Each structure stands twice: as structure tokens, then as C-alpha cells.
Amino acid sequence: MMKVSFHGHSVVMIETNGKKILIDPFIRGNSQTDLNADTVECDVILLTHGHNDHVGDTVEIAKRNNALVVATADLATYLGFQGLNVHGMNIGGAYEFDFGRVKLTQAFHSSHYTEANQNIVYTGMPTGILFTAEGKTIYHLGDTGLFSDLKMIGEMNDIDLAFIPIGDNFTMGPEDAAIAAKWIGAKLVVPIHYNTFPVIQQDPNKFIELLDGVEGKVLQPGESITL
């Protein structure tokens, strides 16, 4: 069985095949998370894109855990320069790792990392992540607006669980996210990327109410689902 837990904002932990896979580990500065950047354990970090609220504490966590970091080639190269063990990929590409299969999808957003000296580093295209292990597929949409190819992604993949941003302003709001959920056709959808900052305040239960023929569940930070 695969355990999947939500940890505020866009942070997701997948436990499968004896490995812990952490997605978008934004912990310090994340008002919604239950994790501690100094103690969280993982074997792998998957990144959807380069914004600071997604890369988060990747460098420190990866170094402390000797974790593999999987990201777009641009972002992986940037993190590799900082001494991390990286595996670069790109949109449409998939790779079979010993912990599961990772495929990157399109996401309509932007992607850069802002350094402490206010230097902005371009980190390639933003992505979503299709993760498959133990016969189950999880789709983390990353940060994105609504786009019609979500229908194609839903048709091409038997998705068991999808994490969909609902915060509005930077990503889809609840109304567009509900349309995305229908197009994706996942067996279960969970809202993410909301309430961390004032401009993305949302009631996740209203998103659940908007779902049409799709099962949705609001997870509190630290809560998990078993697939």
C-alpha cells in the first residue's frame, strides 16, 4: 500500500516501496505546514517548478538526507551547482526510478527562483507531476491555470488521486479547479495551494461543493490517504 499525506500549501509526501518522496518542500515560511525543515526525512524530492514557495527548503533537506532531487533540466542544473544529487527531466518525458515512475506534464504558470540578493534565476518551464507506483497513479498539478489539455491527460492516464491548486490569483481558483477535476477524472481530488498567503485565501469546502461527479476530500496538514 502507498501512503500519501498533505502538509500544507503544495507539500505532499508519498511513502512507497520503502522510500519517502517529498513534493515541493516549502516548509520555512509556510504558515500551513506541520513539518519541520530541520527534521523531515525523505529519500527523494520532486519539484514542480522553481518558485521559492515550491523549491522551499530543498537544498538543506536534500543535503541532510542525501536525497535525490528530480526536476526540470533547468532547475536540476541550478540545484546541481549547489551540490545536490539531481536528475533532470522535461515536459512529456518519463523515467522509471526504483521508487516509481515519474512523468512531467505541462502546467500554465511561470518558473524562476529569487535568490537572497534579489537576483532572479530562470528555472525552465513549470510542470505537473504524474507519479505511478504499486499500480496507482497520483497527479500533482503544481501551479497552473485551467487549460484544455487536462482533458487529454485525464484520458491518457487512470488517475487515482489528484492534488489541484485552488488559491486563485497565482493559479486556478475554485471554479476553474472544479472544471479541471472533472476533466482529469481522478477517483479522488484534494485541494492544495490555498490559505498560505492573504491573496490565496479560500474555503476548500466550497471547492468540494463545486465538484460535479467527482469525489473530493479536504486534507488538513499531516492527514493522509492510503491507496
Image: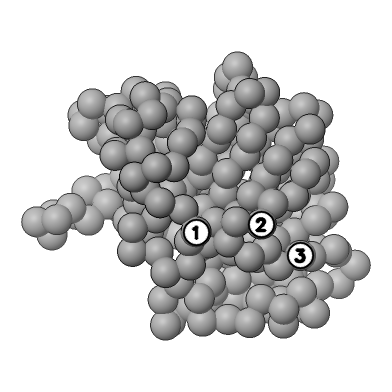
Q: Identify which amino acid the numbered label 3 is placed on.
A: Lys
Q: Which residue lies under the disc numbered 3?
A: 217
Quadrant of the image occupied by residue 119: bottom left
Q: Residue at x 53, y 72 (%)?
A: 194
Image location (x, y in percent) of residue 176: 66, 73
Q: Is residue 134 above or below residue 51?
A: above
Q: Residue at x 67, y 30 (%)?
A: 16
Crowding at mark 1 (Cα within 10 Å: few <14, some 14-19, many 20+): some
Q: Is residue 13 visible?
A: yes
The answer to which of marks 2 and 3 sits earlier in the sequence is 3
Which label sits in the foreground, 3 or 1? 1
Image location (x, y in percent) of residue 196: 45, 72
Image location (x, y in percent) of residue 219: 67, 63
Q: Which residue lies under the disc numbered 1?
A: 34
Crowding at mark 3 (Cα within 10 Å: few <14, some 14-19, many 20+): some
Question: Which dot marks residue 223?
Answer: 2
* 121 or 160: nearer the viewer: 160
Q: Residue at x 43, y 82 (%)?
A: 199
C-alpha distance separating marks 1 and 2: 10 Å
* 152 or 57: nearer the viewer: 57
Left or right of 85? Residue 167 is: right
Q: Residue at x 41, y 76 (%)?
A: 197
Q: Is residue 142 visible?
A: no
Q: Secondary structure at mark 1?
A: loop
Quadrant of the drawing holding the N terminus: top right
Crowding at mark 2 (Cα within 10 Å: few <14, some 14-19, many 20+): few
